Amino acid sequence: MHNYLARQPVFDRRKRLFAYEILYRGNLDNVFPENFDGEVATSTVLAHALINIGLETITAGKKALINFTEKHLLDGTPTQLPQQYCIVEILEDVPASEPVLAACRELKRHGYTLALDDFNFDQRLDPLVDCVDIIKVDFQAASLEEIQGAMDRYRGHGKLKFLAEKIETYEEFERSLGMGFHFFQGFFFSKPELIRRRKLDIAAVSLLTLMAEVNRPDFSFKRVEKMISADVALSYKLLLYINSAFYSLVSKVKSIRHALSYLGESGTRQFVCLAVTSQLAVTKTSELIRAAMVRAQLSKLLAKKSHLDYDESELFLLGLFSLLEAMLDTPIKDLLAKLSLAPDLNAALSDRSGPLAPFLCTILAYETGNLDECLQHLEEIGVSSEDMVTLYFEALKWADLFSEEMPDT
């Protein structure tokens, strides 16, 4: 049986990707075991990181926050992972005993970064605070006044930094930023800043029009070529894309027409939607683009595995457009009115209804660790839990590679 394993991004104060926390929640077929064993959880993560998948695939070369129990710390388990990529996350129930402190000092001596998970500002853990680099604080677990007071008390402990967990909205991000947190973890980056409700400029409307064009039933290479040629940034991205490592070309492609004919209708549609999406979200964190790409590819892979007969390219768009609202800070229904998508796509994106909705709901449930709901939707689309885990990491790898091949312009 496969275990649920996912990653959640951690950002710095400028909303740049700092690291990923590797999340483990038990087995998809046995969602939350009554006697949840932290030793097994850490061992499972390590097995995936070292053997099955590889840390590089899981985190795309970024740092990984991984939970370690008292036993694992005393056994020196963290040293199995490279210190430049692993942040040792000490679970909240680990005591500040002398053996634990000695193990932490030894890890520090070898260059490891240490973090305290779900720290509740218990003064009995102060000796551990002196050993670590990062304190993780659950932003939802106490009042802002309590958190601020405790942070002020610990600011004198060397170069200690604070990480705010469970930041779910941009308002919470701004609040925690003002309180002096250095790092931020949660799903705030995938939510729209609707308070801004920005008006779409002419350039954004043109890009949306191009996306609508490539998704029309009467697809026309001539019309698409004309629209792309009028956009210097898109033209450049297209040539970079077609001449990248994705395609083993004998000679370089030098014209828009040649590139489009080589990609074909399906390839052109995918390129345009990905490139336009990244261009529309230029003011947003790059992790938002990557998350949209993961959803797009995972939707496509789920469609391929599913017993339901749906167009894979349509499911790709479903995943990609599922974060369009956050990218443009504009209600999804306003955006859909400009895109002229198929009715099933509209229904799934606007209110999670219709035959395509279970695919998106499966992904959302997996991302947030709502595994009961994930299993329910997997059953609807006819995909096994084992396949879900495998396809998730395939999508991560694809999205990370694509991000490298499609640089911002």
Image: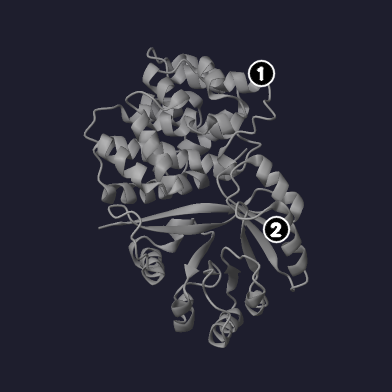
Q: Residues within 10 Å of mark 2 (few under 14, many from 20)?
A: many
Instruction: Check residue 202 in the rendering and tell me which mark sits there, or answer none.
Output: 1
Locate the C terminus by quadrant.
Answer: top right
Locate the N terminus by quadrant.
Answer: bottom left
State the count of labels: 2
Mark 2, residue position: 147
Vertical placement of residue 198 versus 59, above or below? above
**Image x and y of residue 163, in percent:** 64, 59
Disc 1 or 2, which lies upstream in sequence? Answer: 2
Q: Residue furthest left?
A: 307
Give 394 or 39, whichever is nearer the viewer: 39
- Which residue does the image show at 59% across and 68% down from the upper left? 115
- Which residue does the image show at 66% across and 74% down from the upper left? 129
Q: Quadrant of residue 357?
A: top left
Q: Quadrant of residue 182?
A: bottom right
Residue type (three-letter) at the residue carrying disc 1:
Ile
**Image x and y of residue 64, in percent:** 51, 62
Left or right, 396 with reference to 139: left
- Which residue does the image show at 55% across and 21% down from the upper left? 335
